[in-house]
Image (spheres, helix red, strand yellow):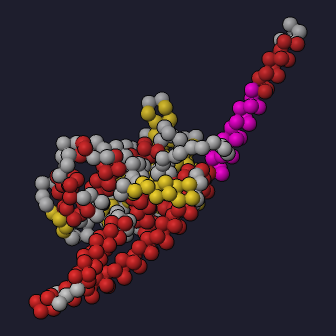
Amino acid sequence: KSQKTFIIISHDRYLLNETTTKILHIERGEIRSFEGNYLSYLEYQEERQKELAKNLDKLTNKHRRELDWMRQGVKARRTRSKKRVEGFHDLEKDIRKLKDSAKRKLTLDLSHSGNKAKVMFEIENGGFSYGDKTIFKDLNLSLYRSNKIALMGPNGAGKSTLVKIIAGELEFTEGKINYPKEMKAIVFDQKRENLDPDKTPFEIIGDGKDQVHLPSGKTEHVNGYLQKFLFNKDQLNRPIAGLSGGEKNRLQLALFMQKSADLFIFDEPTNDLDIESIEMLEQTLIDYEQAVIIISHDRSFLDKTCQHTWLIEDQSIKVFTGGYTQVADYIVEKKLLDQLESQQKSKTNKNQTKNSDQMTYKEK
């Protein structure tokens, strides 16, 4: 509603789309300006990438023909056009420039363990307390093999506690949780305690070796594996203490995706990631056909990746079909109802105070 000028720096695409009319995109030392909201900019970017790919294809074909000409024998070299040789080298520069302009893509792959169980877990009358403080009571929930769940709730509502219970790090103080045989859940945590700041990405991923053994059974060189997560050669042997928040998050993703599981749980996976990396993680989760649970404040991310939402509220969980959008109206309405109830109570208390001043001693 504001009519004032403002600048927002954010990876929250939902917020950018709702509130901005111009995009300034800083990329590889250049600032690109675009008039319109974020969704319009995405469409423009998509068309631009298609155009770049088309031009790159044309230049690559031309380069192939010119390369054949350049490789001709000594006799041909003597009569070779100097201008055409210069054109060949310019062509190589143009191809490099176009490749640099293309989006660098994060390569992600989630590996399911192969467990055929249809139900990941069932919670029966689950309750959990920290001393006198009740976090959950009378929880009855099931998670099925293909479910993608957005886990929402205010800070301190119990999201991380529930995740720890599901992952087997905590137990319900009441009721129980039933798992199929050999069910394995792993958590992508927003904390970075497992990243030794003195070690390098190469040491963390390779663990003393130069090969990575992937869940698919394939073996890959550590350098090649890390390049899939957008690490360049200069960063591979740099101490982790010198990496940015986004680089540390990508390194955690690289570690995380070396494992296979029946259930992947993501706790704030988009923290510090740039928008392009968020979009690639988003697409990976859309394409993945097994169970995931996601805790995130990124509303657009939840909308695109999740089919169901579990909202923690009043020590219980309400289940919705759909991502954030399906829950948004309920949250707004509940907030309004709570405000109305509070105003009503305040009004009633004022009336009672006023009336008590007008009562006789005997009536009081």
Quadrant location, the N terminus? top right
347 or 84, nearer to the observer: 84
> Going 21% across and 65% down the picture, which residue do you hit?
224
Q: Position of residue 199 (x, y in %)?
A: 18, 46
The question of residue 331 being in magenta is answered with yes
**Horizontal side, residue 275 vs residue 200: left or right:** right
Q: Nearer the viewer, residue 350 or 305?
A: 305
Question: Would you place residue 153 above or below residue 309 in this image?
Answer: above
Say how many tags the image has.
0
In the rendered image, the quadrant that contains the C terminus is top right
Above or below for 20 versus 339 = below
Residue 184's image quarter? bottom left
**Image location (x, y in percent) of residue 322:** 57, 60
- Residue 272 appears anywhere in the view: yes
* Quadrant of res 114: bottom left
Majority SS type along the magenta span = helix
Residue ID at (88%, 13%) = 358
Residue 263 screen position, x and y as percent: 38, 59
Magenta segment, which residues?
329-346
State yes or no: residue 10 in magenta: no
* Residue for point 37% across, 46% down: 190
Q: Is residue 270 left or right of residue 207?
A: right
Q: Is residue 63 left or right of residue 157?
A: left
